[in-house]
Image (cartoon, rainbow, N blue to C red):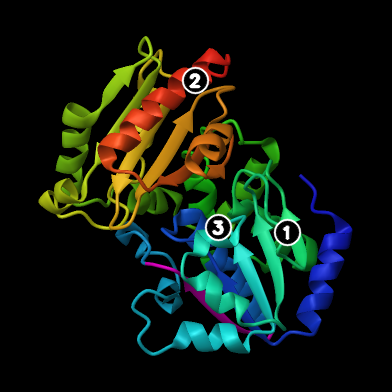
Amino acid sequence: MQIAKDKIDALRAMLENSRRVVILSHTNPDGDAIGSSLAWAEVLKRHGHEVTCIIPNKYPYYLDFMPDIESVVIYKGDNDGIAMKAIKDADIIFCLDFHTMTRLDGLGDIIDSNQHAKRVLIDHHLDPSEDFDLMLSYPKASSTCYLVALIVENMYDTASISATMAENLFVGMMTDTGNFAFSSVTPDLFRMVSVLAATGIDIPNIHNNVYNSFTESRARLFGYVINRKMRIFHNGTVAHMSLTEEEMRRFWFQQGDSEGFVNYPLTIKKMKMSAMFTQHTDFIRVSLRSRGNIDVNLFAQRYFNGGGHKNAAGGKSFMTMEETIKHYEKCVKEFAAEGMLN
């Protein structure tokens, strides 16, 4: 995949006139959001920029091992006002791994208060908004970490990728491709992975930290969800699962504990589409996954005011859990009647 030369030239020109930089990523940040932010921050710091990475809320605990993650400012609980000051003083604001400001929740209003900062999007989600001065938007890219690696290659050469950058980039590439199993995987992605591996990163250790570092409570929660909460319908091709706040408290839920649950029904041979509903104080988070040509991005846009990728998307519901599940089942029938589940 190629990054357009005019985009790289425009990015280089923006950076030449910017000293104070903020890097933002989305609510409920995952490995790709954190990995791309930390790697891009290291590049910019190395070239003399003052960089602050900000996320709306806490990242999952299994990402604690990532290099320099302690430098990330978490807006929720930022009692010292570090995030607000950094955004107010920023010359340029990078938005990584999200395509619309609504993914920032309360942070969006603070960003709007800075009218002089340039806004740059680096992202791989479909249908980005137009609130950016420069958009490096490539929906066919498997991850934002892959995009950052390509940008670094075009601007500074891959020889500039350090082992710490490589570790952070690898986390995002691995997690956003389902451990290199999704259809978004390309030969050029593996070329870039080989560049990262050549820095000497410990790939088995990274894999173990991400996928095998959960708590006992999370393991028991997973068993409960699969055994008690998974419902399969539409002739065995569609599934949904749900977690209420009470159920999460019962299993000592931590941020990230339900990550990956939505994928599990797709291990069933006939399954085409899966949903996970997770209750929060003011809304229900909707996660959607699918196989093949089933477009859950379209489903999320149409029925849950969301979006994402063709086979992985999400949205929100402001109904009760019971109403949300009924709405989902009704929408699946409507979607199927249009031939969208074939």
Mark toward the start of the polypeptide (1 vs 2)? 1
Q: State the residue position of label 3.
A: 169
Residue at image position (59%, 76%) is: 111
Segment colored magenta: 48-57
- Within-10-Å neighbours for mark 2: few <14, some 14–19, many 20+: few
Quarter where residue 136 is shown: bottom right
Reading the chain from its start, which is encountered first: label 1 or label 3? 1
Q: Which residue is mark 2?
A: 334
The residue lying at 44 percent from left, 59 percent from top is: 29
Give the CA separation, mark 1 to mark 3. 26 Å
Residue 53 within the segment the image draws in magenta: yes
Amino acid type at mark 2? Glu
Residue that extends furthest to the right in the rendered view of this protein = 6
Residue 245 as seen in the image, left or right of residue 329:
left
Q: Which residue is mark 1?
A: 130
Q: Residues within 10 Å of mark 1 (few under 14, many from 20)?
A: few
Q: Secondary structure at mark 2?
A: helix
**Does any portion of residue 217 appear in the rendered image?**
yes
Q: Secondary structure at mark 1?
A: loop
Where residue 257 sits: x, y (%)? 27, 50
Q: Quadrant of residue 266?
A: top left
319 left or right, relative to 82: left
Is the N terminus in the top left, top right, bottom left or bottom right quadrant? top right
The amino acid type, in three-letter code, at marker 3 is Leu
Where is the C terminus found, in terms of image quarters? top right
Q: Check whether the beta carbons of the residues at disc 1 and disc 2 lie within 8 A of each other.
A: no
